[in-house]
Image (cartoon, coloured by chain):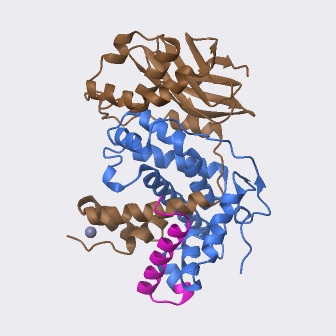
Amino acid sequence: MSAHIGEDAALYALGALEPHEAAAVEAHVEHCSACARLLAQAEDDVTAMVAAGPLVEPPAALAERILATPDASTPATGRQRSRVPRAAWFAALAAAIVVAVLPSAYVYRENLAMHHTMLADADAMARIATSPHRSTAFAGRDAHVMYAPDGSWYVVVIRGAKTPMHVVWPHDGERTMLGTAVPHGDVALLYLPKSHRMDQLALMSDGRVVAQAQLVF
Amino acid sequence: MSALPAWQNPGLARPVRRTPSLMQDSIDDEALAAAFSSKERWAFEAAYARFATLLYSTAYHVLGNAEDAQDCVHDALSRVWRSPDAYDRSRGAIRSFLTVCVRNEAITRLRSKQRRSRLHERVAAEPVEHDEIAVVDVVEHQRLRAAMARLPDEQRRPLELAYFEQKTHVEIAAQLEVPLGTIKSRIALGLRKLAMALGGTR
Ligand SMILES: [Zn+2]
């Protein structure tokens, strides 16, 4: 077994090692969990430096290139969906309460533990359910968005969705990627807590805008 | 002392308004990391959406221009995503893991570019020309400079050379005329102290 990485953790995270030394660090942390933790700490530290420095907005074109990245040739296709992200469920139930568009079977079909997790979010959902909101349809898809008049939250619901769809905010000649609405059953939902008003939203699929909605505040 | 590149000089940076909660959504980093390591496609896209500004900034600071920075972020993320063991949660927070991947990719590119420029018989590697950039948050920018300034010189100098000038520890030791082992300790200590000054482990 190779030597523990010690101070090389910091140098690795900073990119200050010679290539053969960096390779040795990578090989070592594969089988030494103590050093893996040390390296994780150093990586957190360097990330804190980046985050405390000047931040630069990436151009929208980069998001499109990233989204076009294919999966590896041996993807985990045989695997069952390992875990539904909790937030997707939160969004699902929130939307069900707000507009009752979902068949109740959809909400309750999955396992009980997940259901209890959802109930833990009941306070937040109740707030959404009881707060005043507006709704507008997307032109181009069977989809709509519910949103708070102060722009504090948005719920995008897409029906008949077969593949994940990206929700973007077109503004100032750019597009900001807000998140991905992933279909479960054939409904895709995205819950977006925000702190500002977005007067336009668009849905993107395969790098193209497929639907747009104008929001009135 | 050489002049600061534009992005290190707040006087030259055009401040722009930070877009509030730009990339937030309601999936926490833990859930994202779990899904990313089990190769769920949405997690790859969500990771980009969430960390785009951080990752792009990381590459930009090293490479100094938008075109190289975009290529770098794209290639680093694609490689992580397409490799069979893309990311293992024992490697720590996904945010930091990706940031360091992008930074190391950027430094590799920078060094090979400098090697090429040396091959073209320039006397020394040319310093990277930094575009004038729109800094998202000038107050944040000042935090790094202020925290750096509070480090003792013997830790600050080697850390600056590693972080801002992307030098290796061998180059830093030679430049500062300090033994290799000493340089490593000072960089490691300086980094830890700086991160704590910036607000804990995150
Ligand atoms: Zn070890």
Q: Is residue B6 left or right of residue B44?
A: right
Q: Is residue A40 left or right of residue B164?
A: left
What is the number of callouts on the image?
Answer: 0
Name the quadrant of the N terminus of chain B: bottom right
Whether residue A182 is visible, yes or no, is no
Residue furthest to the left: A1
Determine the quadrant in which ligand 1 lies.
bottom left
As displayed, is residue B153 above or below residue B85?
Answer: below
Whether residue A72 is visible, yes or no, is yes
In percent of width and height, residue B183 lies at 47, 83
In percent of width and height, residue B56 lies at 59, 50
Chain A visual colour: brown
Chain B visual colour: blue
Which residue is at 71% across, 66% downward?
A: B5
Occupied quadrant, residue B9: bottom right
As displayed, is residue B8 above or below residue A200?
Answer: below
Q: Is residue B48 left or right of residue B32?
A: right
Query: Which residue occupies the foreground of this view, B110 or B30?
Result: B30
Occupied quadrant, residue A134: top right
Occupied quadrant, residue A85: top left
As displayed, is residue B87 above or below residue B104?
Answer: above
Which residue is at 53% across, 60% downward?
A: A48
In percent of width and height, residue A190 lies at 51, 25
**Magenta stretch: helix, strand or loop mostly:** helix
The magenta segment is: B174-202
Which residue is at 75% across, 63% downward?
A: B10
> Does the magenta portion include A156?
no
As displayed, is residue B5 above or below residue B138?
Answer: below
